[in-house]
Image (cartoon, rainbow, N blue to C red):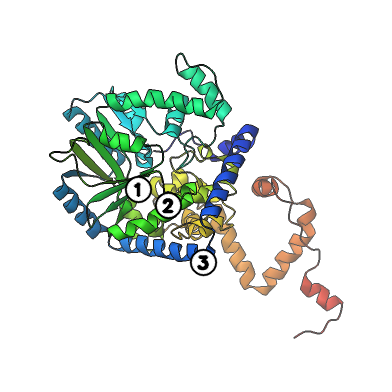
Amino acid sequence: MHNTSFDFQKNIRKALADGQLRKNLKFAMDTMTQKRKAVFSDEEELQKLRNQGNAIRRRALSRLPDLLEQLEKKCSENGIQVHWAETTAQANETVLSIMKKHGAERMVKGKSMVSEEMHLNAFLMEHGYEVMETDLGEYIIQLAGETPSHIIVPAIHKNKDEIARLFHEKIPGTPYTEKVEELNAIARKILRQEFYQGDVGLSGVNMAVAETGTLCLVENEGNGRMCTTVPPVHIAVMGLEKVVEKLTDVPPLLRLLTGSATGQMITTYVNMITSPRKKGEKDGPKEVHLILLDNGRSEILADPQLRQTLQCIRCGTCLNHCPVYTRIGGHAYGFVYPGPIGKILTPQMEGLEKAGGLVTASSLCNACEEVCPVKIPIPELIRRLRDESYDSDGNVKGHGYKKTLAETLVWKGWELMNRHPGLNALGTKMAGIFSPVLPEAGPLKAWTSVRSKPQFARKSLHERVREEGVEHE
């Protein structure tokens, strides 16, 4: 969903002026990049693993329709109820219908970027339901009334002092403390009660295995396991690209995901969910529902180049290494998915006219591509989307929104001048004469705001060669 008040340039200026935000991001990013570097210390082994991860994801996407049908069949055989949603509105309505069916009043949520994409919390609260985020980072930003600023660490933009003030102000009877252990204990005490009071638990899905109908969920806090086992109903929401073909595809992708996301060999909890509670079992939900969300993914899949966007395993490492994201944080991007992956995913989902400005926030330094565990060519796709912004015959929704008659005429003039030597010589001569008085306003204002005004030589190279009598062919 696009924020109609979204002003990317204004958001950038605001973020750059926030000194505390810059300090918080620098500390967090330095820590995360060093952890990743340590866990992937063998460069040769890392490249082999990245090649394997890339092959797994490409293979899955090449067979995606068949694998989704196989996943539905296997899940149904296992007792998992599968629902298809073309749009986020349909996905929200499906969740609502399940809540109503069971007379539920409260939902406890594990971390899920797809639920953020659905704006599920706001939707359910509008319908009178209580929704509690149980991931610590998500819980913090829920208290603050904010959205996640990072795919993996939602509250990465806050330091412990800010969190201490937030807990003191928002949680009744909470004393002010900056001790991390005490802050964790405060949240743990509240959230444990919520798990038992929740009528429905909701989670995301890191991977779904078509071969076995298994939902894979990784986490470090245990809240995901509590949300998927304690409430009597478990709803899993998943973007349809998250399916993999075989169970043997999971270990290498997990290795890449956890190492890239948190610098761990493996997370504390790896949940493999294959069915609801079976007869004789003492815990687990009585019902498990899987909602497969499209939301523009089918259109992305149809383009052979852009479908590489869907290889993403949501590790967030491209954010951690991006010189733009690490200075402005996630909220400046104005949409659910920030950073390099957000720059290529959001414009395709929302349309270039709404979100095309995101692709301009890149130096094309290639840092994101160099660290991507599944080798998504993000800079290449950024360039493609930039081109589509001006292409009246493009494939991406909202293509050509930047194309103007004035710019078209300028490029036609440039083409004409460079095809005719006489016009080229005249244009070069005029540029040299009038360069000193070129205004730093109008079309040049944006350029000269961060660069020196271009200076053209009074004489061209051809003129100087002739004057100095240099022989040439």
The residue sitting at the right extreme is 468
In depth, the one of 26 and 311 nearer the eye is 26
Residue drawn at x 28%, y 37% is: 228
- Residue under the point 47% across and 52% down: 259
Q: Which residue, given by chain and number where applicable, does mark 1 sit on?
A: 206
Q: Quadrant of the image for the N terminus?
A: top left
Q: Are marks 2 and 1 in contact (CB under 8 Å)?
A: yes
Question: In front of the other: label 3 or label 1?
Answer: 3
Q: Is residue 262 above or below residue 148?
A: below
Q: Amino acid at mark 1?
A: Asn
- Say above or below: 350 vs 147: below
Please tell me which of labels 2 and 3 falls first in the chain.
3
Q: Residues within 10 Å of mark 2 (few under 14, many from 20)?
A: many
- Residue at the extreme left of the image, as rendered: 279
Left/right placement of residue 153 relative to residue 252 reads right
Which mark, by number, is residue 44?
A: 3
Q: Earlier in the sequence, mark 3 or mark 1?
A: 3
Q: In this view of the protein, can residue 204 be seen by the observer?
A: yes
Q: Residue type at mark 2: give it.
A: Leu
Give residue 468's position: percent from left, percent from top.
Answer: 87, 77
Mark number, residue 257: 2
Upstream in the sequence, badge 2 or badge 1?
1
- Looking at numbered disc 3 in the image, what kind of residue is underneath it? Glu
Callout 2 secondary element: helix
C-alpha separation, residue under disc 3 versus residue under disc 1:
26 Å
How dense is the environment of label 3, judged by Cα within 10 Å: few (below 14), some, or many (20 and up)? few
**Residue 123: % across, % down:** 32, 30
> Disc 2 versus disc 3: distance between alpha carbons?
18 Å
